Image (cartoon, helix red, strand yellow):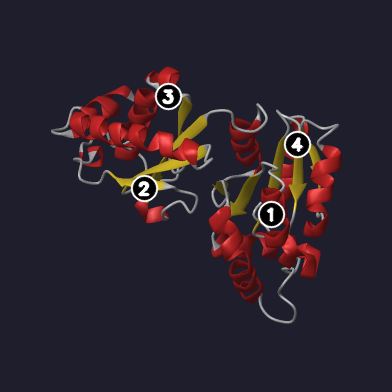
């Protein structure tokens, strides 16, 4: 494959937003092929990457028996030294059920059973592929525009030339993000929720941020955690992993996790020049209360 060419394989759970991501990639200048039989993937990569610098291929269970050939196709790409990235879209079962019910469409593997049965069959079929994914995006709490934005954050410059770190705050009461590579619990920090004047604010507000970051031991804790992440970065590069999600959790995802996520992203950004990384903070659950 010609140097500088990029191949992205897009798959994941039905209803998790593949069409939205495919359209977003097209808007970013990617050449997108939808629902390709996996057996044709190596041939398409060989032919199309001569004329398209960034090629994205959508593979999903609509391909029936052909989807079972995806693992074999990936092995062929590796044998031919064709570099690729695997993007997997996921969402909770409850979210997927709601999406199928709202569109009044059956799940591709539902047959005569319930939607949840089709989802369960698909999860079992995709379990091994998900484990191989370079990037996993949890679309449970993302609307169309937010998913388009997340896609642009990751793939706007083609594939990943540096390690991109998404520091994602969340609330445990809403569930741990399924796309988290690392999870950090900051519920040991005193909660600003119990301070009346801080309760209506969130971790993006200076009074809350200052309160959280000035709590006993927090500055050293953040510094130590950033140091751990920095030590992991060379390993991520060696393994070819170019996108990492660090999930920072507190009870509601409003105060502590938001302030800590912002500070971790800031410190990682300050070290980005020598580490060849980019870091940014996003906040899943701010505004949900």
Residue beneath disc 4:
1
Q: Tell me what residue is drawn at x 18 percent, y 27 percent.
A: 214
In this rendering, the label closer to the viewer, 2 or 3: 3
Question: Is label 4 in a helix, a strand or a loop?
Answer: loop
Q: Tell me: residue 68, above or below residue 168.
A: below
Residue 183's disc number: 2
The 10 Å Cα crowd at callout 3, few under 14, some 14 to 19, many 20 or more, is: some
Separation (CA) of disc 3 from disc 4? 27 Å
Can you give x and y, in whole percent of width and height, for residue 5 in the image?
Answer: 73, 32
x%, y% of residue 177?
46, 51
Q: Earlier in the sequence, mark 2 or mark 3?
A: 2
Q: Tag 1 or tag 2, which sits nearer the N-term?
A: 1
The Cα atoms of the two marked residues, 1 and 3, are separated by 30 Å
What residue is drawn where x is 59% and y is 70%? 124
Mark 4 / mark 1, whichever is N-terminal? 4
Which labelled disc corresponds to residue 74? Answer: 1
* Residue indicated by mark 3: 275
Single out the mark in the foreground, 2 or 1.
1
**From the viewer's perspective, is the residue at label 3 or at label 4 nearer?**
4
Q: Tag 2: Cα neighbours inside 10 Å, few (<14), some, or many (≥20)?
A: some
In depth, the one of 34 and 107 nearer the eye is 34
- Percent position of residue 101, x then y: 68, 65
SS at mark 1 in the image:
helix
């Amino acid at each position: 494959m010609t140097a500088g060419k990029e191949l992205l394989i897009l798959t994941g759970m039905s209803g998790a937003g593949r069409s939205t991501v495919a359209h977003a990639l097209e808007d970013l200048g990617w050449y997108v092929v939808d629902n390709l039989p996996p057996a044709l993937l190596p041939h398409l990569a060989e032919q199309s990457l001569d004329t398209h610098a960034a090629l994205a291929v959508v593979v999903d269970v609509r391909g029936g028996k052909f989807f079972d050939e995806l693992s074999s196709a990936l092995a062929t790409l590796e044998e031919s030294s064709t570099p690729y990235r695997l993007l997997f879209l996921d969402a909770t079962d409850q979210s997927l059920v709601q999406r199928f019910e709202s569109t009044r469409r059956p799940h591709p593997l539902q047959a005569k059973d319930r939607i949840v049965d089709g989802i369960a069959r698909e999860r079992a079929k995709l379990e091994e592929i998900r484990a191989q994914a370079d990037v996993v995006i949890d679309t449970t709490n993302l609307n169309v525009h937010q998913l388009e934005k997340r896609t642009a954050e990751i793939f706007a410059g083609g594939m990943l030339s540096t390690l991109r770190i998404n520091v994602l705050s969340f609330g445990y009461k809403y569930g741990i993000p399924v796309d988290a590579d690392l999870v950090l619990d900051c519920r040991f920090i005193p909660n600003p929720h119990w301070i009346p004047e801080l309760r209506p604010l969130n971790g993006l507000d200076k009074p809350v941020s200052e309160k959280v970051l000035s709590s006993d031991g927090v500055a050293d804790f953040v510094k130590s955690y950033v140091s751990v992440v920095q030590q992991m970065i060379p390993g991520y590069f060696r393994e070819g992993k170019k996108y990492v999600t660090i999930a920072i959790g507190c009870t509601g995802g409003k105060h502590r996790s938001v302030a800590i996520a912002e500070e971790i992203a800031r410190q990682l950004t300050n070290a980005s020049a020598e580490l060849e990384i980019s870091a940014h903070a996003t906040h899943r659950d701010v505004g949900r209360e």
